Amino acid sequence: MIPRLALSLLIGLPLSLPAFAQDQSAAPPLIFDTDIGNDCDDVLALGMIHSLQSRGDCRLVAVTITKDHEQCAAFVDAVNTFYGRGDVPIGVCNSGVTPQQSKFTVLAAEKQGDADRYPHDLRSGRDAPDAVSVLRKALVAEADHSVLIAQVGFSTNLANLLKSPGDEISPLTGSELIAKKVKLLSVMAGAFDMINGRLHREYNVIKDIPAAQALAQDWPGTIVWSGFEIGLSVPYPATSIEQDYDYVAHHPLAESYVLYNPPPHNRPTWDLTSVLYAVLPDRGYFGLSDAGRVAVMDDGLTEFFADGQGRQHYLKLTEAQRVRVIEALVQLSSQPPQGFGR
């Protein structure tokens, strides 16, 4: 087995390990906007964010949820608490989009005797604040042009942020706040290559097409899109789920993966790719398209138009990058929380 430090050198991860994490107050602030509960890649992506924070590469300042089920917020709080960050603000929507029970957020209600298997304070999304207020507070609190956003679910919350008026949090409109505070929006949405010879209507787009259209058309800053084809080409190896999370008797990432679709099953890493690019854009994991703009059609198809004045790109991936990305995602997702050893 390759030692973790040597592997970090090989795949281009930062050399710092959790025990030597930098002052996290200086790390770039990151907002994670997710439809967690609909697929297990959101959970792996959230675990990855915590590992990147432990390395000093980002600082999770808010999680906002676009799956409209009350258990999702409790589950997010349980995962954050597992990683020692149960105080991260969590916001929810009231959209009616995908209100169905998740296969794995039930872990928030799992017990070990009389106690929670995964301790958490937030018991229900009904007790959580609205996502737009959480987003506005998170943006106001950070330095100008510093905030990274990884949107890996529907565009509902960010579209609502865009159209929000000034309020007691800030006199700025949502669009003005975004232009002032956000450095990069990394989005898992759309499809920019043919899939099996056909155009693909991607899930995160078709579940709220008007919101995706508003995001693509009105976002006042840089957007980098990770299309369906990117995550599809870098599947997460089930052997990692079976072997890399056994440093504790129960792990929320591994148990979520198994509940969603038990191994042997190599799940695409759609959401993880957007997080990896958002936090480590200069590590050479991905290539970028030329500058341009994305249009979301009324039927949910996405189309990219090259434009030298545009501020949008989509991710591209070579075979050599694909190998590096898979290994980086495995190492980051399976990294133990601070205080745990291998």
Image (spheres, helix red, strand yellow):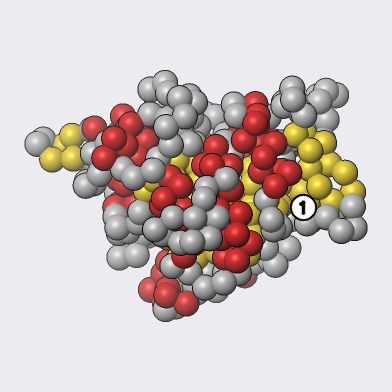
The count of marks equals 1
Q: Is residue 169 left or right of residue 117?
A: right
Q: State which quadrant residue 337 falls in.
A: bottom left
Residue 150 higher or lower than 203, as above or below: below
Residue 70: give x, y in percent of width and height. Answer: 33, 31
Disc 1 target residue: 312
Residue 335: give x, y in percent of width and height. Answer: 44, 57
Residue 178 higher or lower than 244, as above or below: below
Q: Residue at (58%, 42%) from the top-left corner?
A: 159
| CA neighbours of label 1 inside 10 A, class few (<14), some (14 to 19), many (20+) | many
Q: Is residue 278 left or right of residue 120?
A: right
Q: Residue at (35%, 40%) from the top-left corner?
A: 73
Residue 56 higher or lower than 109, as above or below: below
Q: Is residue 169 visible?
A: yes
Residue 99: give x, y in percent of width and height. Answer: 42, 23
Q: Nearer the viewer, residue 70 or 144?
A: 144
Q: Is residue 37 left or right of residue 127?
A: right
Quarter of the image where the C terminus is located: bottom left
Q: Secondary structure at mark 1?
A: strand
Q: Is residue 195 visible?
A: no
Q: Residue at (65%, 31%) from the top-left corner?
A: 210
